[in-house]
């Protein structure tokens, strides 16, 4: 992010201004020619060689007071912003992820602070805590915090239900990791704007409190104090307020430039802006160097030749067991899934077919522990490797997601953060969950990409989601899902949006993964051809109930229920019968 910001001239200007102001705040007292508290007989003197900015009504050197007051003014404003950021922004983000109790409590606190009279509360708190600069800044920071809370909460809510956040949750990422990797980048631009305004507001607050005798006690110098002392003698020195005002404006301008730069480079629009700037710069350089001999460096992107070792085979056992699962709508009480039961064993593939709205996806989300808030498991059990998931804590789910169970959904672009390179997103899983270094996590990701038959893995690693095709994105999503070698993979309509050729490649890939790493698969699909190619047994659902359950041969060749017969008949009209024969031959060859 910082390197991208530096590509903008406005950001470099803002950093230059703030660096100068920060330097002034640090060494300003050392540069002061006089003591900021020492008076003289030269009262309200105009600028001279002795007093470059003149003197105030007590004969004190104005330049010395401005230089010495820069420390309190600048660091006071920074302190206000940091306190507001800590008290407001962090709870605002966490209120989206830490449950309804924390959300309700934080909202009530923010509402209360917003309703308090600003200066009256500041004066009351400094009287209670003590009349000092630290007490005043803490009080002001807490009062400003609700603005950060509202902004950060709104930004976090805008991405909380994004599918790439859900993908991160299913990979086992913790709340801290999700906020740091996916949410903070979205929240930072609006917070940066509030931060800039808070910095400027902090400078004004210091001046206001000084004028009221709160916080900074005279004769301690501040920019606001110098400004306040000059306002009473404008008839003698009408230009006097210009000096502290200029410094305040320069500081606020610097913060605004930085905030605007952060906003401009954030997200997809920022990436496009930087690419346009880079292209314009490159074109300018090429025009100026037409007579020079070009010598561009070439970097061959050679994919790794290392293959992923398959884990040792284990005894077949039940990985997932559903018994009489019933899912209910919390508001209406309607049962959307009723009495669903099945067992899933290692290296087995279970197909789930049925019409839209039959409860297939809700069943998958119940298994993954990600049911929407309006739905709940009202009856029955889901056991994951012998443990009832109703007893799982957040820590248990973080451990299970990615390592025991993972998922791949349709529309893979929605499950990848558009502002982060795809390789970095997959790499992050290994770094967070396995504690790998950046180098080892990158190597592991490249091996995954190669195993999933992505051409030029190193090139794909550096690309953004919008630069890849649908089939490539689906392979990247599968790489993220199997990065921790889970035992169960749920593929919910994972090939629906792909063309026939790519769909066949993904199906072959899933079969290959089942054999190589021992995956057990749950395949949700409308397409019986997909089920015929992949599955060992099939569940047919209609209106939330299982109407038929059996082997692939039993369901597709000897259907018992009228709805199942209708599904098979409709698919036969599109050539399913020929595909079934080919698929059965392939399965026999594969088994032999």
Image (spheres, rainbow, N blue to C red):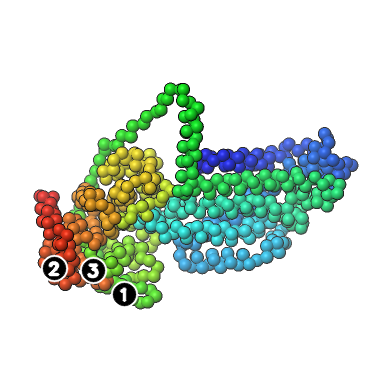
Q: Residue at x 60, y 45 (%)?
A: 257
Q: Residue at x 18, y 58 (%)?
A: 529
Mark 1 residue crowding within 10 angstroms, few (<14) / some (14–19) / many (20+): many
Distance of label 1 from label 3 (alpha carbons):
14 Å
Distance of label 1 from label 2 (alpha carbons):
26 Å
Identify the residue position indicated by label 2 in the image. Answer: 559
Are the residues flagged by discs 1 and 2 in contact, CB closer than 8 Å?
A: no
Choose the circle earlier in sequence order: 1 or 3: 1
What percent of the width, then of the height, locates residue 113?
61, 64
State the mark number for residue 335: 1
**In the image, which is nearer the foreground, mark 1 or mark 2?**
2
Can see residue 498? yes
Q: Is residue 259 left or right of residue 297?
A: right
Identify the residue position indicated by label 3 in the image. Answer: 541
Quadrant position of residue 27: top right
Q: Helix or strand or loop: what does disc 1 sit on?
A: strand
What percent of the width, then of the height, locates residue 440?
36, 40
Q: Give the residue at the far bottom of this rendering.
A: 333
Quadrant position of residue 59: top right
Q: Helix or strand or loop: what does disc 3 sit on?
A: strand
């Amino acid at each position: 992010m910082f390197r991208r910001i530096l590509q903008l001239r406005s950001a470099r200007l803002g950093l230059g201004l703030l660096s100068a102001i920060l330097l002034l705040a640090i060494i300003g007292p050392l540069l002061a020619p006089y003591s900021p508290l020492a008076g003289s007989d030269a009262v309200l003197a105009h600028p001279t060689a002795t007093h470059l900015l003149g003197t105030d009504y007590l004969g004190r050197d104005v330049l010395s007071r401005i230089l010495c007051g820069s420390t309190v003014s600048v660091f006071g404003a920074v302190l206000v912003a940091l306190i507001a950021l800590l008290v407001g922004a962090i709870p605002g983000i966490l209120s989206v992820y830490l449950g309804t109790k924390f959300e309700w409590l934080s909202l009530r606190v923010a509402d209360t602070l917003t309703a308090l009279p600003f200066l009256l509360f500041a004066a009351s708190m400094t009287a209670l805590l003590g009349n000092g600069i630290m007490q005043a800044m803490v009080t002001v920071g807490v009062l400003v915090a609700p603005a950060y809370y509202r902004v950060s909460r709104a930004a976090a809510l805008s991405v909380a239900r994004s599918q790439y956040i859900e993908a991160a949750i299913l990979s086992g990422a913790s709340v801290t990791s999700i906020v740091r990797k996916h949410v903070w980048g979205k929240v930072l631009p609006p917070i940066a704007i509030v931060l800039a305004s808070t910095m400027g507001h902090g400078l004004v607050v210091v001046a206001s409190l000084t004028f009221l005798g709160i916080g900074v006690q005279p004769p301690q110098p501040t920019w606001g104090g110098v400004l306040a002392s000059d306002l009473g003698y404008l008839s003698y020195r009408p230009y006097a307020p210009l000096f502290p005002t200029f410094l305040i404006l320069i500081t606020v301008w610097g913060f605004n430039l930085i905030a605007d730069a952060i906003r401009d480079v954030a997200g997809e629009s920022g990436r496009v802006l930087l690419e346009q700037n880079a292209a314009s710069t490159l074109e300018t350089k090429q025009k100026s160097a037409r007579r020079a001999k070009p010598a561009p460096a070439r970097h061959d992107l050679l994919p790794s030749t290392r293959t992923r070792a398959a884990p040792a085979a284990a005894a077949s056992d039940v990985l997932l067991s559903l018994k009489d699962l019933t899912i209910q709508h919390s508001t209406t009480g309607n049962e959307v899934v009723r009495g669903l039961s099945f067992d899933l064993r290692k290296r087995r593939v279970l197909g789930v077919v049925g019409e839209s709205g039959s409860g297939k996806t809700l069943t998958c989300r119940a298994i993954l522990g990600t049911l929407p808030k309006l739905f709940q498991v009202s009856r029955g059990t889901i056991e994951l490797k012998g443990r009832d998931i109703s007893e799982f804590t957040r820590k248990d789910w973080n451990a299970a997601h990615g390592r025991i169970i993972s998922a791949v959904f349709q529309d893979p672009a929605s499950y990848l953060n558009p502002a982060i390179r795809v390789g970095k997103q997959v790499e992050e899983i290994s770094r967070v969950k396995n504690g790998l270094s950046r180098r080892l996590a990158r190597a592991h990701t490249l091996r995954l990409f190669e195993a999933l038959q992505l051409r030029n893995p190193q090139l794909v690693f550096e690309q953004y989601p919008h630069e890849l095709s649908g089939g490539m994105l689906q392979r990247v999503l599968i790489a993220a899902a199997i990065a921790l070698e889970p035992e169960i993979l749920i593929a919910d309509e994972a090939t629906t949006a792909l063309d026939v050729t790519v769909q066949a490649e993904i199906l072959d890939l899933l079969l290959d993964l089942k054999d190589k790493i021992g995956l057990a698969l749950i395949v949700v699909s409308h397409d019986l051809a997909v089920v015929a190619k992949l599955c060992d047994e099939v569940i047919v659902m209609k209106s939330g109930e299982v109407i038929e359950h059996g082997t692939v041969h039993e369901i597709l060749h000897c259907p018992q229920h009228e709805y199942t017969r209708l599904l098979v008949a409709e698919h036969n009209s599109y050539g399913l019968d020929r595909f079934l024969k080919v698929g059965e031959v392939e399965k026999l060859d594969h088994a032999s």
